[in-house]
Image: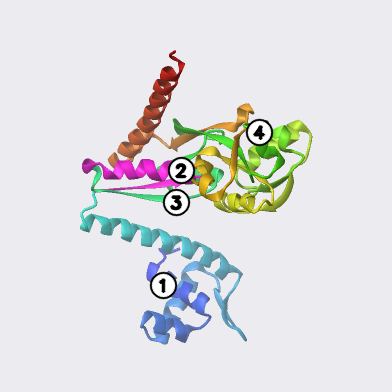
Amino acid sequence: MRDLDLTTLRLFVTVCDSRNIARAAEIHNIVASAISKRLLLLEETVGNKLLERHRRGILPTGAGEILLEHARAMLVGADRVARDMATYRTGIKGQVRVLASVSSIAEFLPDDIARFLQMPEHRGIRIDIQEAIGRDVVRGVREGVSPIGVCWDAADFEGLQTRAYRRDHLAIIAHPSHPIAALECCAFEQTMEFDHVGLPASRAVHTVLARAAAIIGKPINYRAVVSTFDASMRCVRANLGIAVVPREVAEPVAGSLGIKILPLSDPWARRGFALCFQDDRNLSPAAMLLLAHLETGEQQVRQIRFERSHKESKP
């Protein structure tokens, strides 16, 4: 099979989206006959009929649907290459794409990257952050979508290298009038009799809570399931139930929302995050600088915590 032409693939995608060759011609400022000729050549190249006319317009065949999925991915990749190359014309000398879990983005990663970019020696580097669930972070790094990933350290990192990143502490958040709000901290088992506000099953927090509930032998009563930590905290403010979120996410807004934070005493409530990558010998200079910065940042946090606890222990 001959190499696929990106221009033809772009026209093919537009025809599928608009269901009309004439409309696609208007969008790309090209005559309709030229598009028709390119589509015929595309069908010859792949050896399958790709489009059919219906009352609803031109629709992809089964083979066309498969090609459409691949074409979209190829065009996204091509556009990314063009964008990345364009950065060098504007003075950017390095770019790093980071796949990161929801928790890491909500808690500390943006601030850490901001400090990295504020350093004069890094002014020629651009960092792109893309949010993904933990397993997709690992898969993306493994498949080369991103050189660096950040997620919960309980993920399956087989085939990848890892470095320790930051830590957080899961906590219960509750409305001040809720019975559990009278406590200063609690075990997860103490919350099982109350309604919860949960996160989707794909999230790491949901997974760890489901595992804890299975060990306890009691179900979690979810009154609502929302997609973000912010939404769960707003549900708690409305007294729809209690929720489990990282304490580091809740603390900055607890006062303004009027909610109570109760750290969980369970050992699993203290989570670690990891930086993952394929091989540090293959990382770009910019990626190596970012990796070192993020790893050093955690070491600095640990030192500050050690010094603080040492001072508090003195009489």
Q: Are marks 4 and 2 in contact (CB under 8 Å)?
A: no
Residue bearing mark 3:
130
Per the rendered image, the range of residues in magenta is: 94-121
> Under tag 4, what secondary structure?
loop
Coordinates of residue 169 in the picture (x, y in percent): 55, 34
Seen in the picture, residue 115 relative to 78 is either above or below; the reply is above
Please name whichever residue, 296 or 154, is drawn nearer the observer in this view of the structure: 296
Three-letter amino acid code at disc 3? Gln
Q: Which of the two labelled residues, at mark 4 and mark 1, occupies the earlier sequence position?
A: 1
Residue 234, visible in the rendered structure: yes
CA gap, disc 2 and disc 3 = 12 Å
Please name whichever residue, 18 or 293, is drawn nearer the observer in this view of the structure: 293
Label 2, residues with CA under 10 Å away: few <14, some 14-19, many ≥20:
many
Coordinates of residue 9 in the picture (x, y in percent): 44, 70
> Under tag 1, what secondary structure?
helix
Three-letter amino acid code at disc 1? Thr
Q: What residue do we see at 55% from left, 77% from top?
A: 51
Residue bearing mark 2:
141
Residue bearing mark 1:
8
Mark 1 vs mark 2: give the one in front.
2
User: In the visual, does 34 lie left or right of 243?
Assistant: left
Three-letter amino acid code at disc 4? Leu
Which quadrant of the figure has residue 284?
A: top left
